[in-house]
Amino acid sequence: MPNTPPTFSGTIPENYDRYLGPYIFEPYARHVVECAASGTPGNILEIACGTGRVTRHLQKTFPGARLIATDFNNDMINIARQLTPGTNIEWQTADAQELPFEDRSFDLVVFQFGLMFVSDKQKALAEARRVLKPGGRLLFSTWDRLENNPAFNTADRVVKKYFPIDPPRFFHLPFSLYDDDQLTAWTKAAGFTDVRASLVKFTGYSPSAADTAAGMLEGSPMYATLNELAPGQLPVIKEDLTNALAEEFGEAPLTSPTQAWVVDASTFSPGPSGTST
């Protein structure tokens, strides 16, 4: 695992949002905000906001709340700003392991598909706990194993063909936190209570296999890796992946199953007598 989160910079954030956003991230963005809608938070922190898909749903669902959206990659935040003009969202670059906020500042923390990229996952969860008020709530999600998100498993298989020795392994990183017992244990160790991990399944829809391949190879850090390890080969690999995806999941549109774990946890809140409940 890297010591710092992978870099999403240059053209990667735009391609990430254009090709992968509607296909795999939007359904889970809607889902996690629907989960949050059972409460009425006044102060919301989003960690790993990416290009702002969850952020925009949070803003619509809680128009009166103060909303701070953070990400480790400033280029991702720049795309989020462009896609969300004229709003009072506070955008900020921040490391999930060292949040620049006071203790007990937020009622809700949302952390969608970011924990996998953090080096010290227990510390990141402890930081989320630190900045939550008593009675606050954390919602975070991680992808299930690579084999249960088969279009990305296909992408991993195709890329490996071109690198028989020491192939790029970026696709393994987003799908590395699939043990719900471990996720629950880490969350409880960080001081959360009422921890519930749910397996959530959707069908991802993309206009075409070509769009999906572009998102996987040009909308992720795999783009820089392939250009470094195999200069000039990216178009060839992308065509090969497009054909493989079309054969398995359809050419236009492409549909494929996706699976992720969504964890819902809360902090202790003072009871009537000052005791915790």
Image: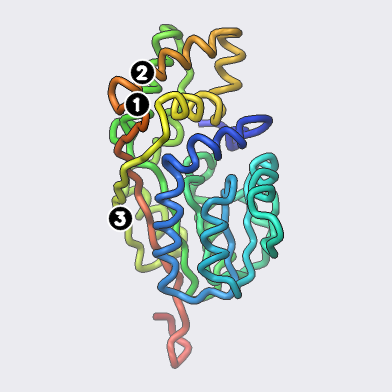
For residue 153, the mark is: 1
Q: Amino acid at mark 3?
A: Ser
Among numbered discs 3 and 2, the one appearing first in the sequence: 2
| Disc 2 target residue | 157
User: Label 3: how many residues lie within 10 Å, few (<14), some (14-19) or many (20+)?
Assistant: few
Q: Amino acid at mark 1?
A: Asn
Q: Nearer the viewer, residue 266 or 191?
A: 266
Q: Is residue 17 above or below residue 28?
A: above
Q: Image point 30% across, 55% down: which residue?
A: 198
Q: Are marks 1 and 3 in contact (CB under 8 Å)?
A: no
- Residue 104, visible in the rendered structure: no
Rendered-image quadrant of the C terminus: bottom left
Q: Is residue 220 above or below residue 140?
A: above
Q: Quadrant of residue 218?
A: top right
Q: Are marks 1 and 2 in contact (CB under 8 Å)?
A: yes
In space, the residues marked 1 and 3 are separated at their CA atoms by 22 Å
Picture coordinates of residue 253 (x, y %)?
Answer: 36, 32
Tag 2 secondary structure:
helix
Tag 1 secondary structure:
helix
| Disc 3 target residue | 198
Q: Is residue 96 above or below residue 174?
A: below
Q: How many marks?
A: 3
Q: Amino acid at mark 2?
A: Arg
For residue 253, the mark is: none
Q: Image point 35% across, 29% down: which residue?
A: 151
In space, the residues marked 3 and 2 are separated at their CA atoms by 28 Å
Picture coordinates of residue 106 (x, y %)?
Answer: 58, 69
Picture coordinates of residue 263 (x, y %)?
Answer: 38, 56
Q: Quadrant of residue 139?
A: bottom left
